Amino acid sequence: MGGSVKDVQSKAELDKVVASGAAVSVHFWASWCEASKPMDDVFSHLSTDFPHSHFLRVEAEEQPEISEAYAVSAVPYFVFFKDGKSVDTLEGANPSSLANKVAKVSGSINPGEPAAPASLGMAAGPTVLETVKEFAKENDSSELKNQVQPGDALKKRLQQLIDSHPVILFMKGNPEEPRCGFSQKVIDILKKEKVKFGSFDILADNEVREGLKKFSNWPTYPQLYCKGELLGGCDIVIAMHESGELQQVFKDHGIDTNASNEAIVSEPGSGKGGISESTDLENTLTSRIASLINSSPVMLFMKGKPDEPKCGFSRKVVEILQQEKVEFGSFDILSDEEIRQGLKVYSNWSSYPQLYIGAELIGGSDIVLEMQKSGELKKVLAEKGIGQKESLEDRLRKLVSSSPVMLFMKGTPDAPRCGFSSKVVNALKEDGVSFGSFDILNDEEVRQGLKVFSNWPTFPQLYYKGELIGGCDIVMELRNNGELKSTLSE
């Protein structure tokens, strides 16, 4: 230990340190996230303050297995361990909270007490702290998509690079010397497809590396483009290749493949989720997943349930959907390991939650949050014909105004199911008043809701032009005084 931060290279390495039972603080970061840098400085200084604890760093994008295990979808993100268990987390750029949580897990202060001055980051210097505060102010939790977009000059350059070859691969390394296994896999596939392609080594140009993620709205590499259109990353390219869809895309775009004339055994996939029947997923599991996705126009695969989310990212998406007043179905992936693992392959999306609209994957919490902020979420919902969920109050307002004279009763005018309702119906008919009616026995939500809405605890209830007149006694009193018809025609 001794006051240093160690980079974690595998989940097994992290698990081993955690299993030791010592106090462990882990910083999930990304090279493109500006807020990660000053927080990393604070993290480093804290490792000096607490030399008997382990301080580890995980590059979230490069270690998806670890990121998925701890539901990381925003950076900076911290996980704290003690006695072999995760005891706390922290999302976002908040140095004071980081210092306090580190101090608590390291056992040097009692819960509720402030951290020592050095632990609050003073050792990191005022410049670092001021920078962190600015980022925290501007980007509450530094969501993955909440970054500054490329400038016009960079956008122009990126577009020129994308258009420089009919097929171009943005990769780590070059075709002769790929520098990551995913890039190597895509190279192998393109060679099997006998396609001529250009390439760009994103490790050689950080501006392109970071800018293209935002330009394409795709956070990882490699990225394969055909005639200026993004096809996807490694998993999608593999799925398209195995299904024969990739070859078809090249043909449709006039790309010379020189491919053999051997028959394609499997039909191309539907594209729902970016994978086809020819993958390792069992047909029964594929059918089950497709059925779940199609079970509701808006479907959320989450950890826990909407009324009891079991991770912060699932809670965020639930809150967003509730704010948008959208009815949605949900599935707790913690209750079914087969669906949990299978859906990752089916959707080519490695983490949860996953939101689907109209059976198409929208993304995780960071994408949904960004879409809500930009107004894109409303647009997508509208395009899919999905309207806002009507609140009970809105529904009741519409019901009481659905007819100039509206009676909420037990039963119907032709078959009243209580004496009071029957009396009001007879009074209205005898005075020649036309009226609409609603049987509250058929709708418990309206029955209970209207009591609160009208502040009137019993039925029947008679309304005129959306305003409550009263119940049976008031209606009968108006009729006996000869005022009923005039009251309902003012």
Image (cartoon, rainbow, N blue to C red):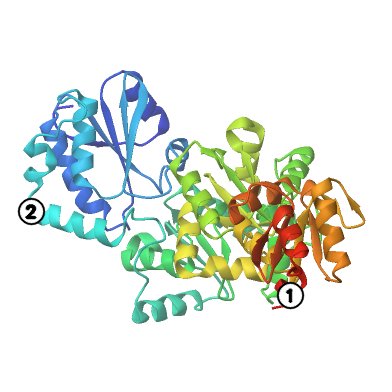
| Residue drawn at point x = 46 percent, y = 46 percent | 313
| Residue drawn at point x = 68 percent, y = 75 percent | 253
Q: Residue furthest right?
A: 414
Q: Mark 1 is on which residue type?
A: Ser
Q: Position of residue 14 (x, y in %)?
A: 36, 29
Q: Give the quadrant of the C terminus.
A: bottom right
Using the image as rendered, state which of residue 174 and residue 30 is in the foreground. 30
Q: Label for residue 126? A: 2
Q: Position of residue 344 (x, y in %)?
A: 60, 44
Q: In the rendered view, would you say 85 is above or below 232?
A: above
Q: Residues within 10 Å of mark 1 (few under 14, many from 20)?
A: few
Instruction: Name the quadrant containing residue 127.
Output: bottom left
Q: Label for residue 486? A: 1
Q: Mark 1 or 2 closer to N-term?
A: 2
Horizontal placement of 461 versus 266: left or right?
A: left
Using the image as rendered, state which of residue 164 and residue 360 is in the foreground. 360
Q: Give the quadrant of the N terminus.
A: top left
Q: Residue furthest front?
A: 481
Q: Mark 2 is on which residue type?
A: Pro
The secondary structure type at the circle numbered 1 is helix
| Residue drawn at point x = 15 percent, y = 26 percent | 109
Q: Position of residue 423 (x, y in %)?
A: 83, 54
